[in-house]
Image: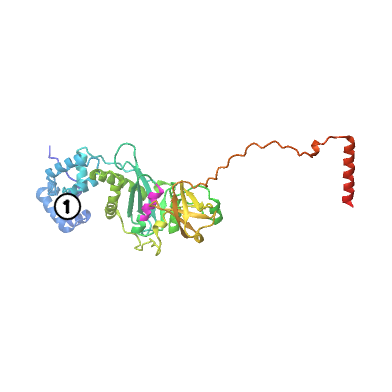
Amino acid sequence: MGEVLAMSEKERVRLVELAGVSRGEQSLAAASRRLGLSYRQAKRLWRQYRAVGDGGLVHASRGRPSNRRKSAELRRRSMELYQERLEGFGPTLAAEKLSEWGFSVNHETLRRWLVSAGLWQSRPHRARHRRWRPRKERFGEMIQLDGSHHDWFERRDGRRECLLSMVDDATGVRLSLLCEEETTAGAMELVRRWIERHGIPRSLYVDRKNVYITDRAPTIEEELAGELPLTAFGKACHRLGIELIAASSPQAKGRVERSHAVYQDRLVKEIRLQGWSTLEQVNEQLASFDEELNRRFAVAPTQAEDAHGRLAPGLDLSAVLVWEETRCVRNDWTLSYQNRWLQIVGPKRSLPAAKAQVTVQRRLDGSVHLFYRGRELSFEELPQRPTRAAKAAVSPPGPRPAPRPAADHPWRRSWSPRAAARSRSVGAAAAVAYGS
């Protein structure tokens, strides 16, 4: 029984063509064209085939260790570190961490090591079923904004903080902020940081959460002004000229949704490695974490023009990203706001009229400001609700004496038919005299 020779598909094709040359069925030049090789390379293969036979076409390194093979010590130490500190890390992220610690290994090499050791299992890719949408052409033309609720600190007690993320549709540049919940304050703070860093975006692509979009009926004032009902976040975006686009499904803003998966993998493991335990610690490092992701994954826009707008000179961003409500001024120049009583002070000529409507503005730092016809008012907070001064106590009146008729009162006179007739005749004569 002959020896079995293991050959690759490419080597078997070369064997067939060179065997035809050996039998005189074709020339070496024709064989080189069919194999896609130069004539010089074909001559080299033909020389090896004639000298060694079929084995001359097999790669000489077959069965030998690669010259670029990683050492057994590096493999052993890498696997130990993975089991000690990187358990659950994907091969790509684990290879990055090992490189930071001085153990340089390619992520595909590490993947093969982990699979062979039973420490990693490849995840199947789900089939795409959504229609692909091309990216926007300019940086800042549309920003996707969304929140991701997750157990970021791995407490296992059911607590789930929310990571708010903004991802540019054209480039993939991102910015994030970790909050307790997905609130208006958190969204405003993240937008403020984006504007300070890049400028005012043209539009925000958001979901239909009541932080961004409201389905309430318009008020009478909004109907008279021809305005649509907006949330506090929507009003702030309207003042900045930012268009809010409501997505119909999570897949519609898939760029930020896929970004959540990156953070849930990489950020959670970074928090574990660094030992962070508070929101403040994470947010202090999120900027550098985002910059590293931008450096690795962001792409260049189709058009180099930046679509971000610039803040108008003198515009205070803290006075735009606010909550605004109207309140009625009482006769004593006080008003109530969130169970607080505010006393408007200042020169009397600058005070608003009683029953006037003033705008109460609450900012991100918690401060409250009052405005009347575009002019800011001075005020003081009262410790309690103002009350009217109590009137002096008045003792109740005593019992009234029973009325007593006068001595000449008709009630005291005796009655007789003659006296009554005389009284009627006197009355009639008086009436005649009055009529004349």
196 and 413: which is toward the camera: 413
Q: Furthest-left residue in view?
A: 51
Colour pattern of the rendering: rainbow
Q: Position of residue 271 (x, y in %)?
A: 26, 45
Q: Position of residue 30 (x, y in %)?
A: 20, 56
Q: Decide if residue 333 is in sight here.
A: yes
Task: Please tell me which residue is depicted at 52% across the width and 54% down the height of the picture.
Answer: 357
Q: Amino acid at mark 1?
A: Val
In the picture shown, does residue 400 fall above or below 362? above
Res 126 quadrant in image: top left
Q: Is residue 188 magenta?
A: yes
In the structure shown, which secondary structural element does the residue marked by tag 1 occupy?
A: helix
424 and 241: which is toward the camera: 424
Locate residue 7 relative to residue 404 in the image: left or right.
left
Q: Position of residue 74 (x, y in %)?
A: 14, 45
Give the magenta range: 183-192
Task: Please tell me which residue is depicted at 53% across the width and 55% down the height of the picture.
Answer: 356
Locate residue 193 relative to residue 406 in the image: left or right.
left
Q: Position of residue 91 (x, y in %)?
A: 23, 44
Near mark 1 (Cα within 10 A), the count class, few <14, some 14-19 or many ≥20, is some
Report the residue marked by disc 1: 21
Q: Decide if residue 338 is in sight here.
A: no
Task: Please tell me which residue is depicted at 54% across the width and 55% down the height of the picture.
Answer: 354
